[in-house]
Amino acid sequence: MEETSSSDSSGAYHGSDLVVDILQAQAIPFLAINPGASFRGLHDSIVNYGGNKPEIILVPHEKVAVGIAHGYAKATGRAMGVVLHDLVGLLHGTMGVYYAHVDRAPMVILGGAGPMDQARRRPWIDWVHTANVQNTAVREYTKWDDHPFSVAAMPDSLHRGYRIATSHPQGPVYIALDADLQEQVIEGPRPSPVTGDAPPIRLGPDPTALRAVAEALCRAERPVLVAGYLGRDPATWPLLVQLAELLGAGVVDTNMRHNFPSSHPLNITGAPEEVTAADALLLLDIKDVGQHTHLMTKEVRGDQPHVAPGAMVLEIGFGDLGIPAWSAHYGSAFRADIRVPADATLALPLLLEECTRLVAGDGRDDSRAERRSRLADGLRSRRDGWRATAERHVEGEPMSTARLVLEVGHALEGHDWVLTAGTGNGWAPKLWDFDRPYRHVGRSLGTATQIGISLGVALAHRGSGRLVVDLQPDGDLMFDAGALWVAAHHRIPMLAVMVNNRAYNNDWSHQKTMARERGNPVENAAIGITIEDPAPDFGGLARSMGWHGVGPVHRPEDIGPAVAEAIKVIADTGQPALVDVVCQADR
């Protein structure tokens, strides 16, 4: 690679300059950081030696930094970088790292460390911020970690880390960079970044096992396909449509990634009776299978089997390859008749080819056509019902979340939009037309993740001309309100519509369940749940952070004009915009 100017006027080349060379060689586009002295050498090298390449994304909290990398990875499939200030910054970022691990989001996390040489530490601050092995704070929920103890060891560590993070199943890696090594002047020839290393390839399926899966699907009278992380590769979108149409199979989109058109006639998401009736169930890159093959609610423990007796259960995915030793996010164990350990994105075109061969001339065209017609009727009925539910509103009462989402969808018509993580309690896929692979990156993960992930998605689409929309829960934003500043500062255009029920609403339903089961007053469930007295002014908050802020909006008919105004501001100025909409809570 071409040499750039040195990070200081002396012409010296430092350990942190080498890190920048490696990051540039890996085409890492961004580094999300909250400044810290433990990586002051790297920070200087990025700005002065590297010319701010990778581009620094300045954030108010380390968890937000990791969340941005998480959202960027979900939107692009690519890894960006995060830099965390030694031990304390790492501890701030741990929840974000855990959720990236759960969600298979690739990223390279760099942490300032030490100095590990005690004789080189500054009084107090270098001691209190240093752990003997700080990597252990995230070792149980990263794919790999390292702590190179010399400048010469840095290239291999950084390249191995990048390769591991981007190999499927993907995930975060953490590499601690000694503060003293970052600032060390490298004498003699400059170390070279590793070049010409072969990129990781996907894991292919066993041909015999894949053929057996195809035969089971083609024999089935009521096949169902359940898609999990398949949509991380947009190329699978048309292939899954083709396979479903060929077989007359219903498709359940788990929304871990966006896998299948929401209005396609064979979409049976939200129709558990179709899963119950299936005689062949193909799981495509699924982790927690229990929520898709069992009758489950968030309130009731002890679910029951939800697969028909004698049904063939088929699995293509990473299976036990993705099971960690520490966290149980892989879900319950399940019986499968055929398991094919493989990257499902690679197996899908091969499976389609095999099924096409088997279906040709098998004499079952009429039965498959009848099944396609029946499933299409079912989807029309469900969507009509969902829309009718959303349209119901009693004047003078807070609108439902469904109505909020419906009105926002109307306002988006004619725009090329992208929805970030949240779906308004699942209503967006029911009411909007998710007709492109990029329309959604997949479901949100949990409280205090939404705004960071949404910023990463918006960053990924910056300059694309697409309108990035965040259906933003109020409780989530309360954790990381300062994150709004990031979009304004870095000119990341996005539209946030507050799903503002003025409560930590998910837990409200749990508290009501407990009250009923124990015979306690249900109205007491609101204590410690509501976000009122005072109610936050999210429009004012947004304006204070450099956004166009509107609201609170209380009436359904006012949502369209408010969103239209916000969209115009975004289009005309590139300024992010927030519309605060107040809706019903689970009272």
Image: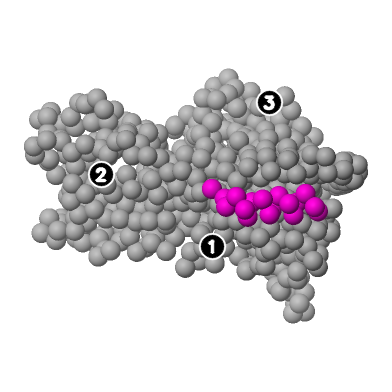
Tell me where residue 259 appears, x and y as whole percent. Answer: 66, 43
Tag nearer the camera, 3 or 2: 2
Where, quadrant-wise, is the C terminus in this rendering? bottom right
Classed neighbour count for the residue bearing mark 2: other residues with Cα under 10 Å, few (<14), some (14–19), many (≥20): many
Q: Which residue is mark 2?
A: 155
Q: Earlier in the sequence, mark 1 or mark 3?
A: 1
Between disc 2 and disc 1, the foreground one is: 1
| Majority SS type along the magenta span | helix
Which residue lies under the disc numbered 3?
415
Residue under numbered circle 1: 320
Residue drawn at (62%, 53%), measured in percent from left and top?
Answer: 208
Q: Nearer the viewer, residue 564 or 192?
A: 192
SS at circle 2: helix
Please name the amino acid that badge 3 sits on. Answer: His
Q: Which residues are magenta?
A: 204-220
Q: Quadrant of residue 1?
A: top left
Query: Callout 3: helix, strand or loop?
Result: loop
Residues under numbered marks 2 and 1 in contact, where contact means CB atoms less than 8 Å apart: no
Farthest top residue in view: 572
Where residue 202 sits in the image (x, y, percent)?
Answer: 50, 45
Residue shown at the point (68%, 26%) measured from the top left: 415
Left or right: residue 457 versus residue 128 is right
Residue at 84 percent of width and 59 percent of height: 277
